[in-house]
């Protein structure tokens, strides 16, 4: 019996990419349905899926929500500059931001600002409250620049095989 070569970490072949793409379209697929969609039998697909998970290529499964319907339809990209930055300040800022439910994403960036936050709240009043009652209370904060999203054009997961 010939065994199929399974690609090593970071080495994705066309089958891996097909599995990932199908799961990004619908992460609720059973292994049997996934195998059918990628034109393979369930056992090898199951083995590939477990490998993709164990190597950290697939990091989890999630549900996308309609932000408006859950009261988080007002999106703001908030550019933050800190007074100073060192390891302790970076850690303190990151810990504080992780506790803020309004912050959907946070990135340490280069350029004129130190961090970019994606903030999702119900409305402008809630955003003002977030800035003045949460973010603005951080002692390491120097300045905040807000960019308000008028329309979402595209939102997709990381893609492979392009």
Image: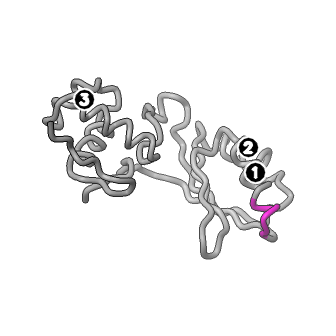
Q: Is residue 3 above or below residue 30?
A: below
Q: Where residue 43 sits: x, y (%)?
A: 25, 29
- In the foreground, 90 or 43: 43
Q: Quadrant of residue 122?
A: top right
Q: Quadrant of residue 93?
A: bottom right
Would residue 70 be counted in the magenta stretch?
Answer: no
Residue at 79% of width from left, 69% of height from top? 86
Tell whether 57 sits left or right of 23.
Answer: right
Q: Counting other residues with Cα less than 10 Å from the Cα at mark 3, is it few (<14), some (14-19), or many (20 or more)? A: few
Would residue 88 be counted in the magenta stretch?
Answer: yes
SS majority, magenta:
helix
Q: Which label was assigned to residue 129? A: 2
Q: Secondary structure at mark 2?
A: helix
What segment is highlighted magenta in the picture?
Answer: 85-90
Residue at 82% of width from left, 54% of height from top? 138
Q: Earlier in the sequence, mark 2 or mark 3?
A: 3
| Quadrant housing the N terminus | top left
- In the foreground, 93 or 59: 59
Q: Label 1 belongs to which residue?
A: 135
Q: Where residue 65 sits: x, y (%)?
A: 45, 32
Residue at 62% of width from left, 63% of height from top? 108
Q: Earlier in the sequence, mark 3 or mark 1?
A: 3
Q: Where residue 59 sits: x, y (%)?
A: 47, 42
Real-space CA distance between mark 2 and mark 3, rounded to the nearest whole angstrom: 52 Å
Tell whether 122 sits left or right of 68.
Answer: right
Q: Secondary structure at mark 3?
A: helix
Q: Nearer the viewer, mark 1 or mark 2?
A: 1
Q: Earlier in the sequence, mark 1 or mark 2?
A: 2
Q: Counting other residues with Cα less than 10 Å from the Cα at mark 1, is it few (<14), some (14-19), or many (20 or more)? A: some
Real-space CA distance between mark 1 and mark 2, rounded to the nearest whole angstrom: 9 Å
């Amino acid at each position: 019996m010939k065994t199929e070569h399974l690609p090593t970490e970071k080495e994705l072949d066309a089958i891996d990419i097909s599995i990932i793409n199908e799961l990004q379209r619908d992460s609720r697929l059973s292994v049997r349905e996934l195998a059918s969609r990628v034109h393979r039998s369930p056992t090898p697909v199951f083995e590939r899926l477990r490998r993709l998970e164990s190597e950290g290529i697939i990091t989890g499964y999630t549900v996308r929500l309609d932000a408006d319907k859950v009261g988080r339809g007002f999106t703001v990209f908030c550019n933050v500059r800190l007074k100073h930055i060192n390891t302790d300040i970076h850690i303190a800022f990151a810990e504080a931001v992780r506790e803020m439910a309004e912050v959907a994403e946070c990135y340490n960036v280069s350029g004129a600002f130190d961090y970019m936050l994606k903030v999702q709240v119900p409305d402008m009043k809630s955003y003002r409250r977030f800035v003045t009652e949460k973010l603005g209370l951080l002692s390491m904060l120097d300045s905040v620049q807000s960019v308000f999203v008028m329309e979402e054009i595209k939102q997709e997961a990381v893609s492979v095989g392009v």
